[in-house]
Image: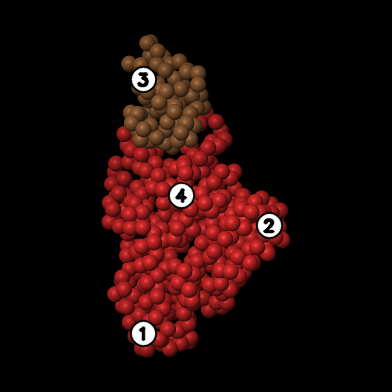
Amino acid sequence: MIYLDSAATTLQKPRTVARAAAQAITTLASPGRGGHRPAMEAGATAFACREEAAALFGMESPERVVFTFNATHALNIALHSLVRPGMKVVISGYEHNSVTRPLYAMPQVEVRVADAPLFDPEAMVRRFKEELEAGVDVAVCTHVSNVFGYVLPVEEIADLCSKRGVPLVVDAAQSAGCLPIDGTEWNAAFIAMPGHKGLYGPQGTGLLLCSDADTTPVLSGGTGSNSLEQSMPEFLPDRLEAGTHNIPGIAGLREGLRYVRSRGTQSILAHERSLIQQMVDGLRWMDGVEVFAARREEDQAGVLSFRVAGWDCESLGEELGRRGVAVRAGLHCSPTAHRTAGTLASGTIRASVSAFNTPAEVEGFLSILRRTLSDATP
Amino acid sequence: MVYYLIICRSLTYAQRTAAALSRAGITAHLLRTPASLGERGCSYSVKISHRRLAQALQTLNRAGVPVERIYITQGDGSYKEVEL
């Protein structure tokens, strides 16, 4: 199997991740739920994971690194903390349903879409500026489009938001682990990310990096602190971490973070970009293939979309799967992104890479696709 | 043995406290706060030697780690709050 679906979940992980998660199941209990050794060691593992994340993402205090179940959970906390009925929220035209669905579910919230052409960061900055000047209460921007790999100009948008005092939520689902993320410099209210993609942790893990913005828990319950009180603690991370932690997941995520820090995000990004460029070079020679690739290298990360004339993207994705290539086809839970890019009717096929893919795998994928297009019926 | 207990509002704060002290060369042990001292229910504390309190407070102040309350052990096993 050639696995090219890391934008959904990285399947190939550092070996230490599975080892740590497996060991945690039999040796670690629950942080904050006792003074015995398995509980204290679980607490030490969780704290070490927070410290790894704080160091990677420029967070001054590890308690501002909150464990979540995934990026969607983290985004829900961020949005429920900031958005109230009657508010206007500007989002980029490349947001995932993990942003749009919670927003559309909130009563009397006006969602304004900063839509700008694909791979045109200057236009995106202009659109955000227009919406901010028109008056919005909260801004949300994905760092990298999960459909097109488009790197949005988050630093510039964060700067605009800071100047206007508008809290910003950054969805770093596709960028955490491969692009620089600075939880302090950006001055974002919240940065949400999964643990199971570019951070190479197990599924069921995510992180929310919190500024000093007020927070609203989406879950209430036991925290192992302030037990006499019937309201959630006011302090982080306890305020946002009700219930037993996913300690095997956190133990694995810690190892994933260590891997990313030791290899370096720049090295991972360079590797992924070179694989994507190899794909683009191969796909462009194939008849009927339309590739969505940035002209400038810095505008795209390790995700690439394409479609093929005469082929339904789901059928082609399925055929590739039968032939041993794992890609994702369809709308990728991001109708907003497809609407903005003009691919809503067709959807696309998405190939996404990780630090563990190789040029030989990309060559294998291109070869299988070439054969499929020549000998299979659309 | 006489020692100080730094009461922390959560496990994570206690871990941060212990980590900052350890980095400064001060031996610090993490433990559950004795029930008699836990004003709001469960919490964690950091135990340090009675000789290191001043240095510990300086270290925590420099590291920006908040200190809630500190207790010193009495001869009879009870605790007395230290005024900060």
Q: Which chain is brown?
A: B
- Image height check: is A261 above or below A25? below
Same subunit, labels 2 and 4: the answer reads: yes
Looking at the image, which residue is at 36% across and 62% down?
Answer: A267
Q: CA distance from mark 1 to mark 2?
A: 48 Å
- Image height check: is B83 above or below A35? above
Q: Is residue A201 left or right of residue A166?
A: left
Q: Secondary structure at mark 4?
A: loop
Name which quarter of the figure residue A232 lies in: top right
Q: Nearer the viewer, residue A18 or A178?
A: A178
Same subunit, labels 4 and 1: the answer reads: yes
Looking at the image, which residue is at 38% across and 81% down?
Answer: A282
The residue under label 3 is B51
**Other-residue count near label 1 (Cα within 10 Å), few / some / many at <14 / 14–19 / ≥20:** some
Q: Chain of mark 3?
A: B
Q: CA distance from mark 3 to mark 1?
A: 74 Å
Q: Secondary structure at mark 2?
A: loop
Cβ atoms under marks 3 and 4 closer than 8 Å = no
Q: CA distance from mark 3 to mark 4?
A: 35 Å
Give the amino acid type for the residue marked by disc 2 in the picture: Val
Looking at the image, which residue is at 64% across and 60% down?
Answer: A90
The residue under label 1 is A370
Label annotation for residue A58: 4
Task: Name the residue furthest top.
Answer: B76
Give the amino acid type for the residue marked by disc 3 in the picture: Arg
Q: Secondary structure at mark 3?
A: helix
Q: Position of residue A80 (x, y in %)?
A: 59, 50
Rendered colour, chain A: red
